[in-house]
Structures are given as structure tokens and as C-alpha cells.
Image (cartoon, grey):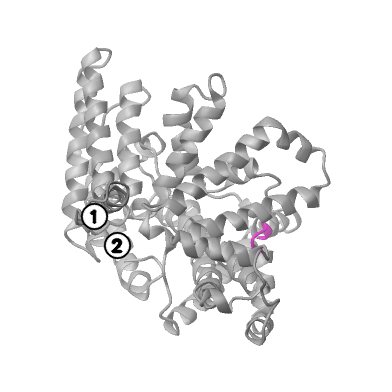
Amino acid sequence: MVFSSLFFLFLFLPLNLILYYSTKNKDLRNLILIFFSLIFYAWGEPIWVVLLVICAIVDYFNGIFICNNQGKSIAKLGVISTFVFNIGLLLTFKYSDFFVENANFIFGTTFKKPGFLLPVGISFYTFQTISYTIDVYRGEVKAQKSFLKFLLFVSLYPELVAGPIVRYAHVANEIENRNFSWSDFSNGVTRFSKGLFKKVVIANIAGSIAVQFLETDIQSMTLLGSWYGIILYSIQIYFDFSGYSDMAIGLALMFGFHYHENFKHPYISNSITDFWRRWHISLGTFFKDYVYIPLGGNKKYQFRNIFIVWLLTGFWHGASWNFVIWGLYFGFLLLLEKAFLGKILSKSFKPIQHFYTLLFIVIGWALFYYTDIHKLLEYLKILFCINKVQFFDIEFQSVFMENLNWFILAIFLCMPVYAYFQKGLIKYIKNEKFISSLNISINLILFIISVILLVGSTYNPFIYFRF
């Protein structure tokens, strides 16, 4: 099930909210959220609910074991157990085909690929439970004694299938005690409406146009068409993922949970370092806190640590060499900025900083898009005119002009215009009732536009569901 489906918007979510707020019993509210979360997760492939619950059981008891043996060396067994189990799940379901395929290529063997289906969200909820047990071992959080409350943390559907990666420490108090607030609920509706609009009106349209230029035969690609296609994909992946994160944060607020931000307008960055402080923040902080700093961080073998983190970051995104290349590509750029490029950039003209950053981001998304390495290389040759290529054709001209107004809107919305609008309202309009009414009107308009487009379209993918 996806947030941007008519079934979720008009049946699942309203029914969940009605049942949740029909009782004031906190334990019953938790049970209702668990029930709806498991239904949400089971909607596509019911069998994977079993895997999710097993994962929760294993890590729940590991947390209890660590807590009961706090300060003893044996407590490490709980961390090792969690790590082996969860990484084992990832290696089995996400990477087994990749390893078998490469082993066959290297050693000339003919082993059959297992062909496991990828459980949706496995990369997210395994990281959440790994962070939980490590934090319990470090003494940063207390182990959750109630299995149902721990299951709520693991299965809560706003972040379950595509993040953000929520740390137990961030929601521990709210799992125990949540108080209803009209302000939170209103902000949640606003955030959800904004995310739905970003997903349906920007990401879906960008994706539907991008495939016309990226999935066509390489020989028929033009220079402007290839750049236009990858820029559209850059727009799609940002609004797709940040839109989902907005909806997740909004849904969580409706139920009294406060998630941390996952995106902070990454396309206004002035360096690659700045970009990765703004993009998929929950994943970046996970690798920083559980890989980079334990390896030595900035104090010891910094370049090695950056290399390892970005190798893992790329590999986390998918079982394909293009993701490894993508991770190492950004790792290399970050190393250059750490070494000398960052100082040069900081002294340069602001537009140059932004152009440099956006150029390498867009090229990075090309590495991310094409899982076929041969097709990727051919596409890059067209992108940089290494081979003779036509400048543009009638198809590009027609599609570009037809979608020009939408394209300008998409570029405009990459900037923090909504935040500026909100600040302007608060600063210049003192009438709170007027501001509240205006927000309600805007939310309704965004929602209606999104629903109209959902009714008239079948193209509604979520890119990060496959990770």
C-alpha cells in the first residue's frame, strides 16, 4: 500500500484515525496502530509480515539480554546477534542474487540465483532495530520491556517501508506517552498535504516524462534530450522521496509522534558536502554514528573512513554495481572537498558553487538510474558528446515546450518557498484565525489537485520502495 493511493486516502487513513481517537486508552491506541501497521505492510505481500515480526522478536530479546547484562562483556553477544541476524536478512533477501551472479562471472561457475523477492522496507526496519540494540548497549536508551511497544516502534507504518530511519531514542517517550495536540494534528495534515502534492504533481509527472528520454534506444538519444531526461529524473527522485518523507512526518504528527527532518532543500546546496547534510539525513546520521565515528571519524584515518562509509552507502541502495559506483563517486567528491576543493569553492562566486554542485549531483543520478553498466557508459558518452550525437529533435522540442510551465514550477519548488511564505504570513499578518483559515484552504487545494491527478493516472511509483 502507498500513501498516494485513493484507498489509503479515503478509507485506510480515515478509519485508522477514527478508531485511534475513539478511545483514550493508551495501550488500546498502540494496539490499533500496530494492527493497522501490519495490515498496511501485508497489503502487497502478506508473507513478509512474518519476517517483520520475527525481526522484532529477535531484537526485542537481544535488547532485554543486553540490558540484563549491562556493563558485562557478555552483553556484546546481544549486539552481535542483532547484527548477524539483520545483516544476514539483508544479504539473503537483497544481495544473494548479486553475489551468485558475480561468483559465476569470476569463477566460471553456473550456480542458480536464489531469486528471493525483496521484502519492502527491509533496508529501513533492519537499520532501525540495529540502531536500537547498539544504543541499548551504549547505555543511551533503556531496553523496552513491553514487546507490543517495541513492535509498535518497528512496525509503525508512516516510516516502515521507505523511511525516514527512525531511532528509538527519538520516539521512546512518545511510545510510552502521547498527548493529543490540535497544533500537531494541523501541522501533520499540512505536512501530509504538501508531501502528497510533491509526490503526485511533481514527482509522478517528472517520472512519466523522464522515461521518454531515458528509456529510449541509446542510438536515438539527443544531447539536449539526454540532459533533460536526467534533470527530470533528478526532480523525480527528490520530490518522490522528500514527498514520501513529508507524508510520513505528517502522518506521525497526526498520531502524536515527532520524527526528525529527512530533507532540507538539498538542491540549494553550495557543495557536495552541503548536499549530503541535506539529503536523506536519517541515513547519513546512521552511517555517521554507527560506522564513521566508530572507525575513527575525523580523528583517525579520515579518508579511509569516508571511503568505507560511501562504499556501504552505495551498496545499501541496491544490489548492483552502479550503486557501488554511485556511492564511491560521491565519496571521491567528498574526499576532494575535504582535501582542498572545499576551500577553493568557499572563496568562489556563489552561482559557481551552485552550478558545480548541481552538475555533479545530476551526473550522480545518471549513475544511480542505469543498473546496466554498458547502457550507463553509452549514456554518459552521449551526455558529454564523446560520440557524435544529434543536438536535439522535434520530440524534445515538443515535450519541453508542452511542459515548460510545469518545469519552471518544479524548479521553483526545489527552493524553500513554502517556508518563506509561512514566515511572511506570521511576520506581516497578525490575525491567527486568518492564517489558520488560509492554511486550511491551501491544504484543501493541494489535496484536491493531487486527488484529481491520482484519479486520472495509473503512474504512481515510489522509487525508494525497492531499497
Task: Kindly identify the amino acid type of the residue bearing the numbered disc 2.
Answer: Asn
Q: Which residues are drawn in magenta?
A: 413-417
The secondary structure type at the circle numbered 2 is helix
Q: Position of residue 220 (x, y in %)?
A: 57, 79
Q: Which image quadrant for residue 371? A: bottom left
**Residue appearing at x 63%, y 83% in the figure:** 399
Residue 414 within the magenta-colored segment of the rendering: yes
Asked if labels 1 and 2 touch by Cβ distance under 8 angstroms, the answer is yes
Q: Position of residue 131 (x, y in %)?
A: 35, 34
Task: Kindly identify the amino acid type of the residue bearing the numbered disc 1.
Answer: Ile
Between the C-alphas of marks 2 and 1, the distance is: 8 Å
Q: Position of residue 135 (x, y in %)?
A: 35, 27
Please tell me which of labels 2 and 1 falls first in the chain: 2
Q: How many marks?
A: 2
Residue 239, visible in the rendered structure = no
**Residue appearing at x 66%, y 57% in the figure:** 422
Using the image, tell me which numbered label, if any, was put on residue 119: none
Left or right: residue 306 versus residue 407 is: left
Residue to which mark 2 is pinned: 16
Please, what is the dominant secondary structure of the magenta stretch? loop
Q: Which image quadrant for residue 458? A: bottom left
**Image quadrant where one finds the N terminus:** bottom left
Q: Residue furthest front?
A: 108
- Foreground pick, 227 / 384: 384
- Foreground pick, 362 / 274: 362
Q: Residue furthest top?
A: 72
**Image quadrant where one finds the C terminus:** bottom left
Left or right: residue 343 versus residue 297 is: right
Left or right: residue 205 versus residue 99 is: right
Q: In the image, is residue 252 above or below residue 215? A: above
